[in-house]
Image: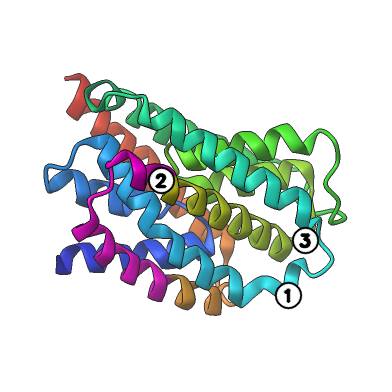
Amino acid sequence: MFELLGWSLLAGVVNALAGGGLFFTLPALLALGIPSTSAVATASVASWPGYVSAYWSIRQQLQTGPWLALTCIGLLGGGLGALALVQFDASHFNYLVPWLLLTVSLLYARQLLSKAGFEGPLVLRRRGWPLLLSGSFYGGFFGGGLGVLLMAITGQLRMGSNLQQHAIKLYLSMLASGATIVVYSLSGLVYWQGGMVLALGYLVGGKVGAKVITKINPKLLAWLIVTFGVVLSGYYFAKFYL
């Protein structure tokens, strides 16, 4: 359990700064022999306190943001994604894990290499609805690299400043994760003993990460997350396909 706590502390910090915390907690849960769908559900539910603490520390960045639209997108997308995961058999879901990790990692890498710029006015345009909804759906369905994906989407939309994009990422992640609590709890997928330990680590880590978010080079951390995600996907390709 101490190992789970350590990984979740790190995951909470990473989620607040760039996203990708599940890359750390998912392997720890799988190593305990927990089925992949249950591991994803447990990590998703446990991550909610961390998102709350991280968002609360940066909430002033969205004082004039499109609150109602983002709230609807986060809750609807996260709930639908969780319902989709419940339908999967763990043995089949195993084969999706490395593809999901690799896709999100490469998508964010592409965004980081873009020269078009990332920032703009804090406005939710019409084309942003389906993109952010799909990101929230992904958060409810898997969630690994959710922050990475949402940063890529908000950067592509040039929706606000860099710090405002971080706030949007944390707000949508908090809502999507919150929506999964109801669905996964009713489905019986959550491994509560490990989930409570993870929740404590996420909570503390999220608070720490939000405090240092303005003092660290976000691009450096993002590239580290991309690298880790690619390496981890390679590990799971070998584990589940070979």
Q: Are marks 3 and 1 in contact (CB under 8 Å)?
A: no
Residue 129: x and y in percent read 75, 37
Left or right of residue 224, residue 17 in this image: right
Dot 3 or dot 1, earlier in sequence: 1
Say what secondary structure mark 1 lies in.
helix
Disc 3, SS? loop
Number of the label disc, if any, that sits on residue 227: 2
Q: Nearer the viewer, residue 109 or 195?
A: 195
Magenta stretch encompasses residue 201: yes
Residue 219 magenta-highlighted: no
Relative to residue 75, is residue 7 depicted above or below? Answer: below
In the image, is 146 to the left or to the right of 10? right
| Residue 47 screen position, x and y as percent | 41, 58
Q: Which residue is mark 1?
A: 60
- Work out whether 130 lies above or below 66: above
What residue range appears in magenta? 183-205
Residue 112 visible at all: no
Q: Which secondary structure is most common in the magenta stretch?
A: helix
- Which quadrant holds the C terminus? top left
- Report the front residue among 156 and 38: 38
Q: Residue furthest left?
A: 33
Question: Residue at (54%, 42%) from the top-left corner?
Answer: 78
* Colouring scheme applied when the structure was drawn: rainbow
Q: Is residue 180 left or right of residue 156?
A: left
Residue at 45% x, 37% y is: 82
Residue tagged 3:
161
Three-letter amino acid code at the position of disc 1: Gln
